Amino acid sequence: MSHDFSERLDRARQGLTRLGWSGLLIAPGADLRYLTGYPAVALERLTCLVLPRDGEPTLVVPRLERPAAQDSGVEAAGVRLLDYPDGTDPYPSVLRGIGADAAILSVGDQMWASHLLALQAVLPQTRWQTARRVLGPLRARKSPAEVAALAEAGAAIDAVHQRMGEWLRPGRTEREVAGDIARAIRETGHATVDFVIVAAGPDAASPHHDTSDRTIGAGEPVVVDIGGTMPSGYCSDCTRTYVVGDAPPDFLEYYAVLQAAQRMAVTAVAPGVPAQDVDTAARTPIADAGYGPAFLHRTGHGIGLETHEDPYIVAGNGEPLGEGMTFSIEPGIYLEGRHGARIEDIVACTGTGVQRLNTTSTDLVHL
């Protein structure tokens, strides 16, 4: 999948102009991949994209990393490469690229504190801001090619969920099942396995339970939340809830509430709708059924080059949704000490409504 990195750099400059900031300093991570395509590894040696509001972008890299930067094609996007040998100070190179009189600079969230402190030392008069105010809105609105990449990731993780009956059964531990799932995530085309949550019985009442050596019992609900990164760099994330045997009656009652709430939230997605309204659409039916305190987290998070990025579907976020925004819809109900459930789909806001990028059924799966 190809991207117009020159156009992305230009849009970032436009954001700097709008805010009146002098430039961006971007370390290895998703922001650097978004702007240049370079999947640099974060090291104690400084790698930094220097993007002035007016002027040529420069990528400062350790000399031994220059071949990798060249192979990534950053120069084709109009980025000048500037390397430095081990044992020399790289921060004056950043200073030359941005100018000593930079009044306000923004840095990416992924920059190490040690690098930021060194930059602040050579630019003592500069004020500092987070680059998220510039790059967050750009990354939040995906191009058609990015939405297609996320749909591919969604289909790949859906294929893993469709195989759950091969691994999930009484007598096996959460960790054993998670190992099978991780292998399947790679088999479906993911480059990396980013997380595998297998939470059975009372463990399912903890939204971010990982895995344990606890044995899965008959009749226990099991929350399976899994995701990885595709070779395209775009991520998958999907949760389904299973029952091994006959489910407890109270669980079936609130699962029906949860499924209806998740559908209502998906249906609420449309351009111009405030993000918080989608959260409300999920939360209201759960609260009306008496389970409000058991819905412990926001309804969703953006997804793209990172599993969690803008926009966030949460109370207090009045940002209107726009075409190309992609995010999760994942309400949950968690009864401490007993069991829990979550349903998660990745969706895309289209020009007229919503597209589900996970397409498997949200019905409770009995194994």
Image (tube, rainbow, N blue to C red):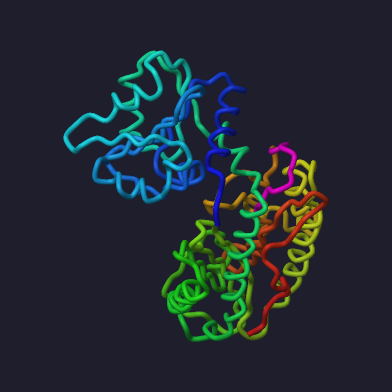
Q: How many marks?
A: 0
**Relative height, residue 18 to residue 233 (above, below):** above
For residue 18, which quarter of the picture?
Answer: top right
Relative image position of residue 132 (x, y in whole percent): 54, 35
Q: Is residue 345 left or right of residue 38?
A: right
Closest to the observer: 20 or 162? Answer: 20
Camera-nearest residue between 217 and 110: 110
Against 303, residue 260 (above or below) is below
Most common secondary structure along the magenta stretch = loop
Q: Residue at x 58, y 84 (%)?
A: 165
**Where is 135 relative to 240, above or below?**
above
- Which of the two residues, 298 or 195, is positioned nearer the viewer here? 195
Q: Specify whether residue 295 is painted magenta.
A: no
Q: Is residue 229 above or below residue 3?
A: below
* 281 left or right of 82 in image: right
Seen at 79% across and 49% down, the residue is 351
Residue 4: image location, x then y, percent: 56, 45
* The residue stretch that appears in magenta: 317-327
- Residue at position x 65%, y 52% in the image: 327
Magenta highlight on residue 319: yes
Q: In the picture, which quadrant includes the N terminus?
A: bottom right
Identify the residue at image location x=69%, y=37%: 316
Asked if residue 258 lies left or right of residue 126, the reply is right
Image quarter (top left, top right, bottom left or bottom right) of the C terminus: bottom right
Q: Nearer the viewer, residue 181 or 3?
A: 3
Image x and y of residue 206, in percent: 55, 61
Q: Position of residue 98 (x, y in %)?
A: 40, 23
